[in-house]
């Protein structure tokens, strides 16, 4: 298994009602469609960029030729007037932009970075769209004709969506593998992604609702991230015997209890029968090491909030095995420092029975 988290280098919200206001330091990113104080139809969209060097290094040095998937994740902070069903759209941005140092609440406004009209105001008024649209891209106009709101690539390969219903989580977990592939292959430059509502409801009275997400400036444990996931598991048990019932004990080996935030740690899982068969021998029957079957997976949970940081996944959190026993590897870079985490182990037996092992597999991440 492998899950590697990459955090943004910049983000901002573009507000159509505040066409020159920069929000590069806001703790919240907002994707909304709403009425302004003047009663006009308005929208907000999100720009967010992940560092190119880290994406390239992860795919080249860590994924190392394996098939991978890339997911954009963002965590809901607040929402109002949500409809029963809605869909968010994601496209790669087609032009570079400046983060800026503004906040929506600043008075007077800060306009030294990306806003609805401008991609950059540091060195003069640089519009998002100048003249005709470049081939393969699109932008948008306000109803009154004001240019703005970003410029992005079109086409099915460059569009990702996530649909939400009444009963689903409202956090974003959107597959943007095609976009990351295009960045990695240099088919298009990496200027980040734009997150928006469908054009069918923007600037219309069809639906007015707000979705607000934690930004990379948040002081919580919920910053947005790009997750690169790939399967690097291996299952070569040699002569070790796999358990075949739910009467087993699994303990975590090579857990020092505290790890540096930039470390990579391999954890071992020691498995034995809970009630081993008595035999005549000179060593303890409780020292006979067994292994979990290949249908075994791990999950990571924040100990304080019980938030699932990495969920079970049959492709990307498989538990490996060699002639010594079971193991898996965790990249600590995606974990907030000075917090405690715990592992959960899920095993699916050949009978179809599922066992969750929660035996206080705790550890802490330090800066």
Image (cartoon, rainbow, N blue to C red):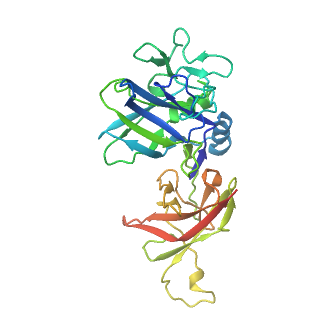
The answer to whether residue 215 is left or right of residue 34 is right
Residue 200 image offset from top left, x and y in percent: 34, 24
- Identify the residue at horizontal 60%, vertical 54% (top origin): 335
The percent position of residue 123, horizontal first and vertical second, equals 69, 19
Q: Is residue 234 visible?
A: yes
Question: How many numbered markers are drawn?
Answer: 0
Vertical placement of residue 11 versus 117, above or below: below
Quarter of the C terminus within the rendering: bottom right
Residue 171 location in percent, x, y?
44, 45
Say above or below: 275 vs 237: below
Q: Looking at this view, is 86 or 33 the one in front?
A: 33
Q: Nearer the viewer, residue 57 or 5?
A: 5
Residue depicted at x 55% and y 27%: 21
Quadrant position of residue 180: top right
* Residue 203 coordinates in the image, percent (x, y): 37, 23
The quarter of the picture where residue 39 lies is top left
Among all residues in the image, which is located at the extreme top?
A: 131
Is 54 placed above or below 3 here?
above
Identity of the residue drawn at 29% across and 41% down? 84
Please, is residue 335 above or below residue 34 in the view? below
The answer, for residue 239, to whether it is visible in the render is no
Q: Nearer the viewer, residue 129 or 114?
A: 114
């Amino acid at each position: 298994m492998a899950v590697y988290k990459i955090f943004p280098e910049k983000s901002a919200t573009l507000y159509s009602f505040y066409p020159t206001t920069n929000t590069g330091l806001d703790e919240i990113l907002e994707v909304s469609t709403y009425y302004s104080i003047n009663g006009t139809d308005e929208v907000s969209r999100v720009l967010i960029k992940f560092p190119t060097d880290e994406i390239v290094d992860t795919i080249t040095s860590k994924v190392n030729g394996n098939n991978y998937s890339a997911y954009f994740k963002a965590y809901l902070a607040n929402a109002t007037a949500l409809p029963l069903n809605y869909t968010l759209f994601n496209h790669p941005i087609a032009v570079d932009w400046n983060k800026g140092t503004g906040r929506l609440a600043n008075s007077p406004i800060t306009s030294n970075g990306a806003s609805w009209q401008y991609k950059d105001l540091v060195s003069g008024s640089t519009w998002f769209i100048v003249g005709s649209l470049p081939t393969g891209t699109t932008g948008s106009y306000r109803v009154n004709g004001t240019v703005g709101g970003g410029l992005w690539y079109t086409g099915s390969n460059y569009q990702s969506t996530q649909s939400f219903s009444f009963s689903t989580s409202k956090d974003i977990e959107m597959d943007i593998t095609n976009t990351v592939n295009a960045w990695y292959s240099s088919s298009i430059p990496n200027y980040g992604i734009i997150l928006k509502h469908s054009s069918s409801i923007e600037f219309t009275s069809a639906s007015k609702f707000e979705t607000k997400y934690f930004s990379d400036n948040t002081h919580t444990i919920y910053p947005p991230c790009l997750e690169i996931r790939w399967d690097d598991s291996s299952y070569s048990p040699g002569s070790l015997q796999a358990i075949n019932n739910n009467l087993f004990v699994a303990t975590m080996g090579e857990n020092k209890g505290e790890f540096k935030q930039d470390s990579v740690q391999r954890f071992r899982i020691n498995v034995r029968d809970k009630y081993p068969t008595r035999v005549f021998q000179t060593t303890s029957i409780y020292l006979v090491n067994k292994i979990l079957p290949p249908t075994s997976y791990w999950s990571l949970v924040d100990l304080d909030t019980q938030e699932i940081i990495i969920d079970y996944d049959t492709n990307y959190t498989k538990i490996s095995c060699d002639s010594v026993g079971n193991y898996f590897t965790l990249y600590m870079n995606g974990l907030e420092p000075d917090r405690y985490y715990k592992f959960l182990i899920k095993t699916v037996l050949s009978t179809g029975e599922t066992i969750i092992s929660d035996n206080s597999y705790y550890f802490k991440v330090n800066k």
